[in-house]
Image (spheres, grey):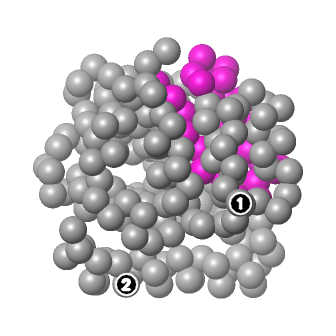
């Protein structure tokens, strides 16, 4: 197989197994980077058939992605979040095939599950989607990939700078467990607002860094 599924994960023991199983059902090898989880994320991923790398402490999604990227040996890569629901094997191939055929440099998956909050958030900020297919070497060329805890803005900026071909790919029936559901409403809301604040700071001042 010429593609690897890479999943950064933090405290996703209840969900990571199902995501790994979908990727394995698609016939793809899976690499999970456990970002210093305090639950059984690593064990759940291994039971589902993933190879797991562990970080000793939580460093953020960008650091986990970069750590996994250094261990990917295939020419193509699929990035997935660890908290997806409704994901199907065909979703992975919808993103991967245009990249393998050379039609796109990157395909970005966006949710179409009918959930009010998850669909709205994904449609309002599709450039923040964690579901992507690309050439491995292209992702390695992204500058500032680990400058902040989330890698998506740096990736999106590099797409714009390099002016390569990319497209959004609807993932019908797929969605994501929201932070408010995973961490409790108030803690999840604080985490979400903190993420948006950090991303806003990046958009206002980080694009000039190279």
Q: Residue furthest front?
A: 56
Report helix, strand or loop for mark 1: loop
Q: Is residue 120 at all visible to an observer of this figure?
A: no
Q: Position of residue 136 (x, y in %)?
A: 36, 36
Instruction: Identify the residue at image location x=48%, y=65%.
Output: 150
Where residue 47 sits, quadrant-wise, is top right
Q: Is residue 154 visible?
A: yes
Q: Image point 43% across, 25% down: which residue?
A: 74
Left or right? Give the position of 80 relative to 10: left
Counting other residues with Cα less than 10 Å from the Cα at mark 2, is it few (<14), some (14-19), or many (20 or more)? few
Q: Is residue 1 magenta?
A: no
Q: Position of residue 77 (x, y in %)?
A: 44, 34
Front residue of this view, candidates 66 and 208: 66
The reply to whether discs 2 and 1 touch (Cβ–Cβ < 8 Å) is no
Q: Is 119 left, or right, of 105 in this rendering?
A: right
Q: Nearer the viewer, residue 40 or 167?
A: 40
The relative height of residue 172 versus residue 119 in the rendered view (above or below) is above
Structural crowding at the residue carrying mark 1, measured as other residues with C-alpha within 10 Å and reported as few (<14), some (14–19) or many (≥20): few
> Which label belongs to residue 13?
none
Viewer-proximal residue, 79 or 175? 79
Q: Label for residue 56?
A: 1
Which residues are drawn in magenta? 3-29
Q: Residue at coordinates 17% horizontally, 43% vertically from top-left?
A: 164
Mark in the foreground, 2 or 1: 1
Q: Secondary structure at mark 2?
A: helix
- Reading the image, the residue beneath label 2 is 201
Spatial separation of the CA atoms under disc 2 and disc 1: 28 Å
Residue 15 on the magenta span: yes
- x%, y% of residue 208? 19, 76
The quadrant where residue 32 appears? top right
């Amino acid at each position: 197989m010429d593609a690897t599924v890479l999943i950064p994960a933090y405290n996703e023991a209840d969900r990571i197994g199902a995501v790994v199983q979908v990727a394995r059902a698609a016939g793809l090898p899976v690499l999970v980077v456990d970002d210093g989880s305090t639950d059984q994320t690593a064990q759940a991923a291994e039971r589902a058939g993933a190879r797991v790398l562990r970080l000793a402490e939580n460093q953020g999604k960008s650091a986990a992605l970069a750590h996994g990227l250094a261990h990917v040996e295939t020419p193509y890569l699929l990035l997935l979040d660890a908290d997806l629901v409704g994901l199907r094997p065909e979703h992975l191939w919808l993103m991967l095939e245009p990249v393998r055929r050379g039609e796109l440099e990157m395909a970005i998956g966006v949710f179409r599950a009918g959930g009010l909050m998850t669909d709205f958030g994904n449609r309002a900020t599709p450039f923040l989607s964690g579901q992507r297919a690309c050439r491995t070497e292209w992702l390695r060329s992204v500058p500032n990939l680990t400058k902040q805890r989330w890698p998506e803005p740096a990736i999106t900026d590099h797409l714009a700078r390099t002016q390569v071909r990319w497209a959004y790919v609807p993932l019908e029936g797929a969605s994501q467990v929201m932070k408010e559901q995973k961490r409790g409403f108030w803690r999840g809301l604080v985490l979400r607002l903190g993420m948006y604040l950090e991303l806003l700071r990046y958009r206002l001042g980080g694009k000039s860094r190279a």
